[in-house]
Amino acid sequence: MPDVPTYDDLPADVMRGLISPRMSRRSMLQLGGASALAMALAACGVSSKKGATATGTSASAQAKQFWSDKKQLGTLDFANWPLYIDVSPKNKNDHPSLNLFTQQTGIKVKYSEVIQENASFFGKIQPELAAGQSTGYDLMVITNGTYLDKLRELGYLIALDQSRMTNFYQNASPLVKNPSYDRGNVYSMAWQSGMTGIGYDPKHTGRVITSWADLMDPAFKGKVGMFGDTQDLPNSALLAVGVNPETSTEDDWKKAADWLKKQRPLVRKYYEQDYIDPLSKGDIWASMAWSGDIFQANASGATLKFVVPKEGAVLWTDNMCIPQHAAHPVDAMTYMDFVYTPEIAAMLAESINYITPVPAARRIILQDAAKASGGDKASLTDLATSSLIFPSPSDFSRLHRYRVLTAEEQKTWNSLFEPIYQS
Amino acid sequence: MSRSRLQARLAPYYLVLPGWLWLVLFFVVPTFVMLSVSTQTGDIVSGFKQTFHWHTYVEAWDSYHVQFVRSLVYGLVATLLCLLIGYPVAYWIAFRGGPYKSSLLFLLLLPFFVSFVIRTLSWNFILSDNGIVLSPLRHLGLIGSRFHVLQTPYAVIGGLTYNFIPFMVLPIYVALERVDRALLEASADLYASSREAFRKVVFPLSLPGVFAGVLLTFVPASADYVNASILGGTRTTMIGNIIQTEYFTNLDYPMAAALSFILMALLLVGVFAYARALGTEDVFEVNAR
């Protein structure tokens, strides 16, 4: 073995250098990092995102003042959900109703189908609105419920110009005038509404389904679908236990949660919006469903049925509203009122297959059906006579709105219902 | 000391600076902000304030420990399956691939030019109750009429395995590729059978690749939410889905941040335990080898 120097052989100053404590480069960098971390820990806080909110009579005065100096500018940036406007049969990007609008008013519309979900769209526009910047949109369509409430509470919506809503007040259905989630239509006008009832395939269920209680039938074990969300699911459960959701109390919510827990073993999956495929294929036999989806599936050849259950169903509405710092608010108001003329409402209803806010459109669709022929005539007549598009008076009496919740109530509500579909 | 000596002593810090800045900007600062958010209280309308409310972590664990354990179990099972399937594939490409190695690797990676979500949705189509896999089996009488694969944990774990196989195959392939063929010749000279040669020479040398593959698979698989959302049913919710709901639906940022931190801690514990089990003194050593 070669000679290896031992500690005794080393000169004294080298020994001193070796054993004296020293700051290595590594520990210096670690110390620098740690101290930076420690310094900033207490500093953070996410400040309130509130803008200015207006309530009561001062609100209408503020709104009047806001609109007093605004002018029509000739452009409209419209954000909407996919498949939620009329399309010309030859070209999917061409929208006859928008072309008519441009013809009549001279306003050019930039139409974007950027809203996939209320939650993700809210997440997209919230930072810009919190920073006081424009979202790039003058008009957007948001479902009533949590996100519309949040937008209102945070002051992110511009109060509408009531003087520019003549068509609305003349032609809108009573369902969407002065709704519980926006008394006086201060911030929103309905775009389309829909029902959340039960969709089922009679071939597989073997019988007619008429109530939420039918979704508790043990014969359907593993073949039932429900929605996995904090709006449709809990409100429908409240109806199932015989309570009006809009006036329900916390005890009622607990009863509804118990009902849902009892139903869990029968449910195959708590779907988001993808229930229509399994329902058509036969993976599930009966499911919570949206009226428009069932109508469209049947138009494509399925044989599903939609029913507004005996205990009641939820009516939701997608609403047009104007975000803060919109560049062309007057153009947005013009469009919003334009949509409430019966002719235009009929054009939209013929493509969209959800509940139009203008009952007079029905007469126009029947006129169109009389003028058409063959397949078109059949589908238009279907549309005009379908209770999914124009609910009957008995249906109306069984339709209810979502419970409006404060922030505190929202927490309790979520903690009761989220474990149902998230455990 | 003289100017040049000072510069000489500071030079290494200057050289580290770009790497340090990147680390600080993209890792330290976000992690730190998340830690800070997790101890705040409030809501989005009235604002969040820093109150050092560590109880959020207790609430997070109380409410969701089932999902945490389930996510780790699914991730572990998916990782093991990926290992069982991926190791032979990597071995075969490295040792028997010959001139076709790059084509085989390309074929392995080809599905991954399609988006993750679309691939998972295609499994939804393949495994559906009356689809091309289950329908013939049902006609043959091999499965009952109520049998289904979708909306069971098996579908979710299957989806996870499918989506993370390349992350397992590629590191193992790289490690096996670096094994010196001369070592195999040497072991043959010393009377080792091919099985012994694999067990005693090739496998230990491929362990760094296995370690990297397991890390790259286990961590993302446990945190995944797409598979559970598309292929899962009522009892397959993973922690990724919970964090998504807390952040987007409940707008409860402190809870979402706390959940993320707990997940990170659990995964780190798992990784360090695994590194110990592999027999390394230092996790970083394994990767450097």
Image: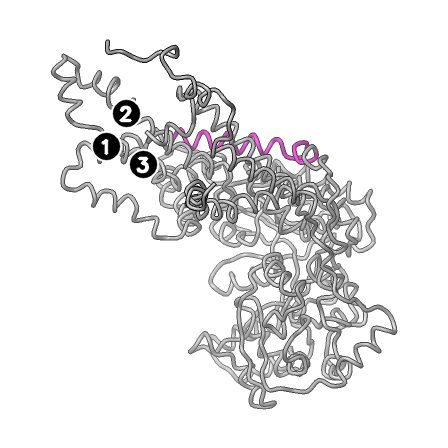
Pointer 3: residues within 10 angstroms few (<14), some, or many (20+)?
Answer: many
Residue on which the image places disc 1:
B178
Pointer 2: residues within 10 angstroms few (<14), some, or many (20+)?
Answer: some
Query: Left or right: A3 with respect to A284?
Result: left
Marks 3 and 1, the one that precedes in the sequence? 3
Element type at mark 2: helix
Q: Are marks 3 and 1 on the same chain?
A: yes
Q: Quadrant of residue A293?
A: bottom right
Q: Amino acid at mark 2?
A: Leu
Element type at mark 3: helix
- Mark 3 to mark 1 CA distance (whole Å): 14 Å
Residue on which the image places disc 3:
B169
Q: Quadrant of residue A135?
A: bottom right
Horizontal and vertical percent position of residue B28: 54, 43
Query: Pointers 3 and 2 in contact (CB under 8 A)?
Result: no
Q: Are marks 1 and 2 on the same chain?
A: yes
Residue on which the image places disc 2:
B205
Query: Left or right: B212 with respect to A344?
Result: left
Q: Amino acid at mark 1?
A: Arg
Marks 3 and 2, the one that precedes in the sequence? 3
Q: Is B269 covered by the magenta stretch?
A: no
Q: Amino acid at mark 3?
A: Val
Segment colored magenta? B59-81
Q: B246 or A282: nearer the eye? A: B246
- Mark 3 to mark 2 CA distance (whole Å): 15 Å
- Mark 1 to mark 2 CA distance (whole Å): 9 Å
Residue that protrudes farthest toward the left in the picture? B189
Would you say residue A336 is visible in this rendering?
A: yes
Q: Quadrant of residue A241?
A: top right
Note whether B265 is above or below B251 in the view shown: above
Would you say residue A206 is visible in this rendering?
A: no
